[in-house]
Image (cartoon, grey):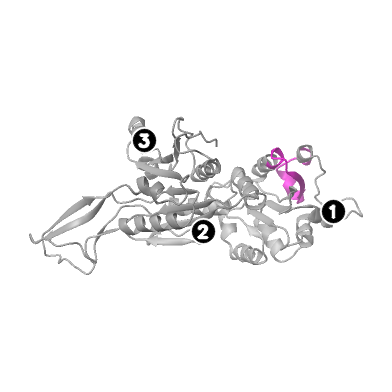
């Protein structure tokens, strides 16, 4: 992209307008030059003079606002990027059928699509977001080359819970800056997700409750932030929406071999270990007092008495640095506990951080997950733990940490 940092910031009338103003301030603080155009309904949520005092430019809200001016043409030529935030269902549907009955639609029609990025950040009620008209419009706009962001899942202004919530301002800011205004090479990140399955015979296995959803969501968010992400996931784990480079694993051995192959053949900047890896694999089976080796071609009869001897697996995370082509690999571990005792939780994290190769630990507790309060604590060596964060904020912190050039034996505290 151009070295200039001109953003045409479009807004439509939504309860999320105050969040968009937070984003506007972040862009201005980072020395972007921002001009704002909006629908008249936007002024139900923000005063025009407030926006003008922030940007230093008049807010354009009408076609031919100053009679013979050509702002609907000039602003599009001036901008390096156009951002529509928040984008209501009404505005998205208007854009998809080419309506120019307000300034946002006219600016869209005059914009050089395909030559410069046009980013849309939707915000609306869940039913509006999933309405066939809106879904078709989003697909059409994507096919035209527009960059339509996803929405957050959460509580909406109407009191309902679901998709449609505007992404947080810091995420949109990081996304725009790193995807479109960052001249550095993409960060190459490997993420593991899901549960290993240790075979007993051809129809039975030992596993755990991990769904891989956290890993898939982190992969998606880092992909949206402009990283080159490879997701190494269990065959049955959740699929990401935006990450396309996926490698499947089944058991402990296949995961270990996959990580060894990937890290040794390509230089990754970081590995994020969200996978729930079995501490034990099946060593021997004793059906009816007759010892046999586990085998997927074997099926033990349900009428047999069965004893299973397990063997302890080594910690894959401790070998990642030796596997890695990049000896400055940043390793981020996840730790799940099941205790309300904070001291026990911290001791579990400290045990992982005793490995000097591990730079950060993302901790959560099963009690919080079961009570629908799924928050993450982030720990780095020689620092206090950071505040409890939701997944999006935790991912932003991970991303910021990966950007820092750390040496292996000293960890700097990251900032949210």
Depth check, front residue: 372 or 336? 336
Spatial CA distance of label 2 from label 1 is 38 Å
Quadrant where the image shows the C terminus = top right
Q: Is residue 92 magenta?
A: no
The disc at residue 71 is: 1
74 relative to 327, above or below: below
Based on the displayed image, in which of its 4 quarters is residue 49 positioned?
A: top right
Residue 116, how many percent across, how many down? 72, 58
> Label 3 belongs to which residue?
354
Depth check, front residue: 186 or 66? 186
Residue 268, how many percent across, how many down? 49, 52
297 relative to 357, above or below: below
Spatial CA distance of label 2 from label 3 is 32 Å
Q: Dot 1 lies on which element?
A: helix
Q: Dot 2 lies on which element?
A: loop
How crowded pointer 2 is (Cα within 10 Å; few <14, some 14-19, many 20+) is rated as: many
How crowded pointer 3 is (Cα within 10 Å; few <14, some 14-19, many 20+) is rated as: few
Based on the displayed image, in which of its 4 quarters is residue 133 positioned?
A: bottom right
Judge left or right: residue 107 versus residue 244.
right
Identify which residue is drawn at 33% across, 51% down: 277
Residue 362 appears in the picture as rendered? no
The disc at residue 225 is: none
Q: Which residues are magenta?
A: 27-50
Quadrant where the image shows the N terminus = bottom right
Residue 228, how many percent across, how many down? 54, 55
> Label 2 belongs to which residue?
243
Residue 5, how many percent across, how many down? 73, 47
Spatial CA distance of label 1 from label 3 is 60 Å
Label whose residue precedes the other's in the sequence (1 or 3): 1
Identify which residue is drawn at 67% across, 48% down: 14
Judge left or right: residue 42 versus residue 16.
right
> Which mark is nearer the camera, 2 or 3?
3
């Amino acid at each position: 992209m151009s070295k200039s940092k001109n953003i045409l910031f479009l807004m439509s009338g939504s309860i999320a307008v105050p969040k968009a103003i937070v984003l506007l301030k972040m862009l201005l603080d980072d020395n972007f030059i921002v001009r704002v155009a909006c629908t008249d309904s936007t002024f139900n949520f923000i005063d025009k003079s407030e926006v003008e005092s922030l940007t230093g430019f008049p807010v354009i809200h009408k076609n031919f606002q100053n009679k013979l001016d050509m702002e609907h043409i000039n602003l599009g030529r001036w901008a390096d990027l156009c951002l529509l935030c928040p984008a209501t269902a009404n505005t998205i549907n208007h854009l998809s059928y080419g309506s120019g009955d307000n300034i946002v639609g006219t600016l869209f029609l005059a914009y050089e699509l395909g030559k410069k990025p046009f980013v849309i950040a939707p915000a609306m009620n869940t039913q509006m977001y999933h309405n066939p008209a809106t879904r078709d419009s989003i697909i059409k706009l994507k096919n035209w080359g527009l960059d339509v962001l996803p929405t957050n899942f959460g509580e909406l202004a109407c009191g309902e819970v679901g998709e449609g919530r505007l992404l947080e301002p810091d995420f949109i800011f990081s996304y725009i800056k790193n995807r479109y205004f960052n001249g550095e090479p993409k960060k190459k990140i490997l993420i593991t997700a899901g549960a290993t399955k240790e075979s007993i015979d051809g129809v039975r296995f030992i596993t755990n409750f991990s769904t891989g959803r956290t890993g898939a969501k982190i992969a998606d968010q880092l992909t949206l932030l402009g990283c080159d992400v490879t997701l190494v996931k269990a065959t049955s784990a959740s699929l990401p929406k935006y990450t396309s480079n996926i490698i499947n694993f089944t058991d402990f051995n296949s995961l270990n071999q996959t990580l060894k192959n990937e890290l040794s053949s390509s230089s990754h900047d970081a590995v994020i270990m969200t996978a729930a890896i079995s501490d034990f694999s099946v060593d021997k089976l004793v059906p009816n007092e007759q010892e046999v080796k586990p085998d997927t071609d074997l099926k033990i009869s349900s009428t047999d008495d069965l004893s299973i001897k397990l063997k302890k697996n080594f910690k894959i995370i401790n070998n990642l640095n030796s596997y890695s082509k990049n000896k400055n690999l940043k390793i981020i571990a996840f730790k799940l506990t099941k205790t309300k005792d904070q001291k026990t939780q911290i001791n579990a994290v400290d045990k992982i951080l005793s490995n000097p190769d591990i730079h950060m630990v993302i901790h959560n507790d099963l009690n919080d997950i079961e009570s629908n309060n799924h928050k993450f604590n982030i720990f780095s060596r020689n620092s206090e733990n950071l505040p409890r964060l939701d997944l999006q904020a935790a991912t932003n912190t991970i991303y910021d940490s990966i950007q820092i050039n750390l040496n292996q034996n000293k960890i700097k505290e990251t900032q949210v």
